[in-house]
Image (spheres, rainbow, N blue to C red):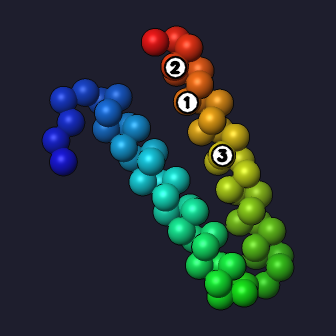
Amino acid sequence: MFYSRQTSLRLHEEHLATLQLWGRLEQSIAARVPEAELDALLRNCSAALAEEVTRHFDFEEQE
């Protein structure tokens, strides 16, 4: 995929990383991983979601 702007590339990369993280969560739930491992992954998901939402809306407000 060709990107003429770095912003588009960055957004695409962040989107892929988010999809990978949620995919890991889905696989972990299906595999019934140990609770401690799932808790750690859920903390990562929570932090990633908070960061993504905050950054997304900050970006929209600034543009």
Using a 10 Å C-alpha cutoff, classify the residue at mark 1 as few (fewer than 14 neighbours), some (14 to 19) or many (20 or more). few
Q: Which label's residue is closer to the chain start, 3 or 2?
A: 3
Q: CA distance from mark 3 to mark 2?
A: 16 Å
- The residue at which mark 3 appears reads as 49
Name the element at disc 1. Answer: helix
Q: Do callouts 1 and 2 mark residues in contact (Cβ within 8 Å)? A: yes
Distance between the alpha carbons at the discs numbered 1 and 3: 10 Å
Q: Residue at 52% x, 11% y: name it.
A: 62
Residue ranking furthest to the top: 62
Q: 61 left or right of 36?
A: left
Mark number for residue 18?
none
The type of residue carrying mark 1 is His
Q: Earlier in the sequence, mark 1 or mark 3?
A: 3
Q: Secondary structure at mark 3?
A: helix
Q: Identify the residue at image location x=70%, y=40%.
A: 50
Residue 7 percent coordinates (x, y):
35, 29
Per the image, the residue denoted by label 1 is 56
Residue at 54% x, 68% y: name it. 23
Numbered badge on residue 60: 2
Left or right of residue 41, residue 5 in this image: left
| Other-residue count near label 2 (Cα within 10 Å), few / some / many at <14 / 14–19 / ≥20 | few
In the rendered view, tell whether residue 41 sits above or below residue 60: below
Given the image, on which type of amino acid does mark 2 rest? Glu
4 or 30: nearer the viewer: 30
Where is residue 44 drawn, in percent x and y? 70, 57
The residue positioned farthest toward the bottom in the image shown: 31
Mark 3 residue type:
Leu
